[in-house]
Amino acid sequence: MDHRKLLRVVVFRPGALCFVLVIGLAFIFTRCKLASGEGRLPAEMIEFTGLVTDPACPLPGEPEAGRTQEIRLDQGVTVLLYVETPARRGDRIRGKAVFACGEGSRNPGGFSERNWLWSKGAVWTGYARQVEISPRDNWILALKRLPDRLRDWVRLRHASFWRTPPGPLLLSLTLGDTRLLEDKETYWLRASGLSHLTSVSGTHLIFLLGPAAWLARRTSSPRRLRQGLTLPLILLPGILSGWKTGISRASIMTMATRLDPLMRQRRDLFNLLFLTGSALLVSQPYSIYDQSFWMSLTTAGAVSYTATRLSCREDSIRQKFKTTLCFSLTAQLILLPYQMTTSPGIHLLSPLVNVIALPLAACLMAVSYPAVLILSCLPAGTGVEKLAISLFLFLLKPVSWLILCLSEIVAKFNQAFVPLRLIFLLIPLPTVIFLLKLNRLGRRPLRLTCVLLASLIWILAVWLVFYHPDQSQVLFLDVGQGDASLFVSGSGRSLLIDGGDKGNGFSTIIPAARTLSLRRIDLAVVTHAHADHAAGIAELMEAGFIGQLFLPAVDAREVDEEDNMTDELLLIAYQSGTAVDSLKQGDSFSLDGWLVEVLHPAPREGLVDLNEASLVMRVTIEGLSILMTGDLTEEGEGQLIRTGRDFSSRLLHVPHHGSRYSSSDAFLDACDAGIALISSGRNNRYGHPHPDVLDRLDQRGASLYRTDRSGAVFLKIRGGKGTITTWLKSPDD
């Protein structure tokens, strides 16, 4: 196909014009509905009544566990409500619940609850305290519930299969349900560019229909009959996964193309793609906010165009490999803008690992779907079923292990990660190459000169915006009821002090570090081994993201607390090959011209309280000092004061999230900080920060910043002067 015909082929089609019209109407309609829904509920506990519109799926082996169900309230507002006693689709539900409006991301590169809710047609989430369910039954509801019952049955009936070591990956590949995957496995798949395999889409249809078509060709039946017999298989992945946008788009297009031989016609793929997108937006208008909807459409379009370009190539093993690599590269390039929203940059090994992983995933799915069918025909809990499960696991376990192993190796190979600012610098290069290939510039030197000049101006502008070699940054992350502070020098050296609770390492710190163009963190310090400070660091070590770890010089055997992660941190550090050292009062080290002084604790004997023995460090950057205090208690503050050392600082990271048992008058006077930062979770159950602490800080005229109100807080230092900005606008502003 001639490049000059691309615009005519893709754009000037009835489907394209219809798609543009539907996009506009869907955007106007949904924005009006969402805007009107935001003001209809108070952010407090209220009584509610509504209708269950999506009952959600249970976890394998947990039929009675609570679920987050989609409910349309009588006020006309759609909410996502967690209920401990699940209801069926179409049932009436009433009770009391605490509702909250969804927020955007609270950290750079973080998850946006608001966007996720909008893609579901909701703006509110809630937790039901008291629920009363009124069952409704009629033949229409019975038909609507059939797919729900099938999805629930497959998950619950085969729980013993899904709960095996390879089961979580098999469940995510075949049903698109990733809830059983460990956090680190989810991160490996996402960082290596393989997470698209866990979102049921056209790839899964190919993996399912390919073996079925191969078997059908071995029969002597007519081609039309074979096509007709495989049509029901097209619906299977969509029914089992819940008809998400990706598989819905793929199923409609596949069904249409499979019907072509029966109807003696050949459809235009681009026109079909746009018409399919229009149909999906008409039936699910809130898909316009769903990233997977746009990923599916753009990837399908790019792959279809690439297929037309490669359709006449020779049929050899070498050419097939090159074609597969070309498809993988095309898909990765198209997915690049979407990936950069969660991981600001690209992994250079993603296309290659996809070429290797796709055939492996095809093998898994080609066996998993028949395995589910065969196991469904065997009596539950019998020796025959257990024997069949053992046989299938024997076939599937090595392949699933290999996929996870590949994803782990690639995810930990941080040297191949290209940060966003470098990508911006290279944007003009493919543009110039593409235009030269079209031969539109080679014969026009003046036009070529203009393009090259524009490219140089672009590169200069990107350099001025992103590159500040003389500027240091401190990012106080919002990790809920925990602490995590990331220090980055102008040359890219980094120091992390604490890492928040479980889940924050993978979902908060790594995306934030990527936005700052970090491939890994050089040094990490755990002020004390409580989970809300240390669990995120453990995850970072599992991800191969930490160069060296520092712990307090406290003997963990003398800590009489259950929530002590010291042994776990040491074990993970040993397994991941992370160097470990200890810090105590009087120690100091430098990093790229910074001075880090350890002021507390001193070596001691006997039982140790982890909070009291928190590391207290003063970080001095170009003359501006920051006092990091962990969860230091009032007793620990007294010990620090009695040392007689000067620990006055410009910025105080307030001890223990603003607890009333810290930040004494004597300590605040000795610190004499003009700026105070409190890291605490929104609406936390501890009441942090305590009003008494806020009063003491206010009496001293300290400028206060809180992560529970402002999200992440940025401190940029240049020439000894600091500038503070917040990720979110504080309600007090």
Image (tube, rainbow, N blue to C red):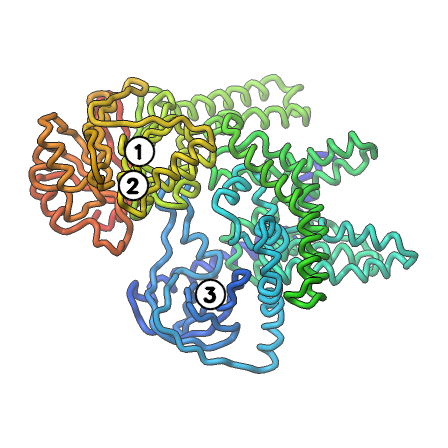
Question: Considering only order in the chain, which callout, 3 or 2, is on the residue closer to the N terminus?
Answer: 3
In the rendered image, which residue does mark 1 sit on? 497
In the rendered image, which residue does mark 2 sit on? 483
Question: Considering only order in the chain, which callout, 1 or 3, is on the residue closer to the N terminus?
Answer: 3
* Above or below: residue 98 compared with residue 732: below
Q: Observer-nearest residue: 297 or 27?
A: 297
3D distance between C-alphas at marks 1 and 2: 8 Å
Q: Amino acid at mark 2?
A: Asp
Residue 573 as seen in the image, left or right of residue 607: right
Question: Considering only order in the chain, which callout, 2 or 1, is on the residue closer to the N terminus?
Answer: 2
Could you say which quadrant of the image residue 261 lies in?
bottom right
**Residue appearing at x 46%, y 74% in the figure:** 51
Neighbor class of circle 1 (other Cα within 10 Å; few <14, some 14-19, many 20+) is many
Q: Observer-nearest residue: 431 or 319?
A: 319
Q: Amino acid at mark 3?
A: Ala
Q: Observer-nearest residue: 449 or 435?
A: 435
Neighbor class of circle 3 (other Cα within 10 Å; few <14, some 14-19, many 20+) is few
Give coordinates of residue 588: x percent, y percent.
Answer: 25, 21
In the rendered image, which residue does mark 3 sit on? 65
**Residue appearing at x 37%, y 56% in the figure:** 102
* Local secondary structure at mark 2: loop
**Residue appearing at x 64%, y 52% in the figure:** 274
Could you say which quadrant of the image residue 253 lies in?
bottom right
3D distance between C-alphas at marks 3 and 1: 37 Å
